[in-house]
Amino acid sequence: MTTSQQIEQEIGLRLARLRLARNVTQIDLAEKAGIGVRTLRRFEAGDPSTLDTFLRVAAALDLEQAVLSVLPEGDIRPIERVSQKGKERRRASPASEQPPKTSWTWGDDVDD
C-alpha cells in the first residue's frame, strides 16, 4: 500500500520533471504560481506541502483539467433522482446494522 508521503514525493518528482521538460525555471514557476522559490523546491523534493501549493503549481503548469479529471463527477443516478424527487444528496446514509452472525454447527440442536 502506498503511503501519503510516497504519493507526495512522486507528485513532486513528476511536477519537477514536467517543469524541466517545458524548460521552465523554478524561479519562473514559483512566480507564476504565487509561491516562494524555497516552497517550490521543498514541494518538488517531496517534502510535506499543502493542497493550496499543489493546486497553484498545477495551475501554473496548466494542469487544472488533468487534476480535475482524476476524480469522477459523482453524479446522482437517475433512479435516485426520481426516488428523492429531484433533490441532491447532502450526506451519506449510516451503515445498516446487521444482526451478528451465529456460529451454528451440527449437533448444536436442542432435543425437545
Image (spheres, rainbow, N blue to C red):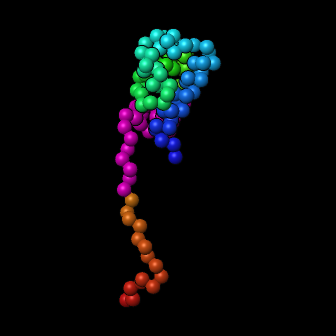
Give the residue displayed 55% in from the left and 23% down from the top: 16
The residue under the point 55% across, 13% down is 25
Residue 37 coordinates in the image, percent (x, y): 45, 16
Q: Position of residue 20 (x, y in %)?
A: 60, 18
Point out the residue furthest to the bottom here.
Answer: 112
Asked if one can make out residue 31 in the rendered structure from this viewpoint, the answer is yes
Kindly give the residue lying farthest to the right in the view shown: 21
* Residue 76 vs residue 66, the one in the foreground: 66
In the depicted view, which residue is nearer to us: 79 or 76?
76
Query: Which quadrant, please, contains the C terminus?
Result: bottom left
Residue stretch in magenta: 70-97
Residue toward you, 60 or 71: 60
Magenta region, main secondary structure: loop
Identified at 38% across, 41% down, the residue is 92
Residue 110 screen position, x and y as percent = 38, 85
Give the quadrant of residue 89. Answer: top left
State whether residue 80 appears in this view. no
Instruction: Please check the rendered image and state whether residue 86 is part of the magenta-colored stretch, yes or no.
Output: yes
* Of 101 and 110, the residue lying toward us: 101
Q: Position of residue 44 (x, y in %)?
A: 50, 25
Q: Is residue 54 above or below residue 22?
A: below
State yes or no: residue 60 in magenta.
Answer: no
* Number of marks in the rendered image: 0
Q: Residue at x 50, y 33 (%)?
A: 9
Above or below residue 60? Residue 14 is below
